Image (cartoon, coloured by chain):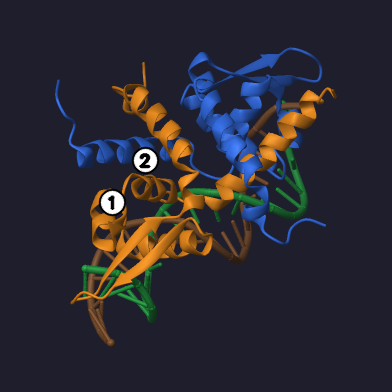
Chain colours: A blue, B orange, C green, D brown
Amino acid sequence: MNHINPVKECSQKIIAIHDVMDLLNGKWKVAIIACLCFEKMRYSELLKTVNGISGRMLSRDLKELEMNHLIKRKVLDTKPITVEYEITDYGATLKNLTAVIAEWGLNHRDRIKGTVTLP
Amino acid sequence: MNHINPVKECSQKIIAIHDVMDLLNGKWKVAIIACLCFEKMRYSELLKTVNGISGRMLSRDLKELEMNHLIKRKVLDTKPITVEYEITDYGATLKNLTAVIAEWGLNHRDRIKGTVTLP
DNA sequence: CAGAATCCAACGGGATACTG
DNA sequence: CAGTATCCCGTTGGATTCTG
């Protein structure tokens, strides 16, 4: 059994983290993924659920996430047209990741935002 | 025992995720935290370990992380001067988060970098 | 060694208006 | 409803040079 050089192991992790941060770059992608891990949603629902995102950014990020096979886009032929976004099996492997992030955020809300930003 | 409205619960998580993404914004912060969770490091070591980061960004991000009490800066009076960065107890609560991200990245490296993003 | 300063390019992201 | 098209600004981030 080989011992792994601890420095090497760290480097590997750093590279892996770069990959992920590259895939989920920007302010919104993690939140979008988290939403869709929770349940499939339509464009307008995402717009409301992902607080503060603009339509432009939502479109853009959805397109990128779809290109990376993390989500699926399904056009329903209702009238008027509606579009449903759904997490893929691949994307669903990110569920734990989003859960850990959300949990940390919940536990440390006060320290993060500090004094302000809450009435 | 109260039932939590599932939509409400999702919204809470989204907000929490926004907090975290705000705290760890940019390409490098998560990697820096991961490094320092692994072991304390000097500036120049971080520069080598966090692949590809520039000195300017490292300085900037270290300052921000310090302001948020996630890391500590310690000046050693060697000559020439050396500076050691160390994770705080508070910052160390992010260790699991960085580990989960790194693990996902490692497991899915092939698909991310892939051959040519899948035919 | 550990940065600060300067310059500059590129991207992120908001607001608004428009389309099928 | 689900976008697309512009416009426009602030930030990010790289390269380089300078300092104690």
Tell me the SS state at disc 2: helix
Residue type for callout 2: His
Q: Indicate the secondary structure of the residue bearing disc 1.
A: loop
> Where on the picture, by quarter, is residue B45?
bottom left
Q: CA distance from mark 2 to mark 1?
A: 10 Å
Q: Up-down: is A20 above or below A79?
A: below
- What is the number of the mark on residue B52? 1
Question: Disc 1 marks which amino acid?
Answer: Gly
Question: Could you tell me which chain the residue with mark 1 belongs to?
Answer: B
Q: What chain does mark 2 sit on?
A: A
Residue A60 visible in this rendered orientation of the protein: no
Q: Answer above or below: position of B4 versus D4.
A: above
Residue A5, how many percent across, how many down? 17, 36
Would you identify the image quadrant in which residue A83 lies? top right
**Residue nearest the viewer, comparing B1 with B70:** B1
Q: Position of residue B9 (x, y in %)?
A: 75, 30
Q: Residue furthest left?
A: A2
Query: Callout 2: 10 Å neighbours few (<14), some, many (20+)?
Result: many
The percent coordinates of residue A25 (x first, y second) are: 48, 42
Please give the label number shown on residue A50. none
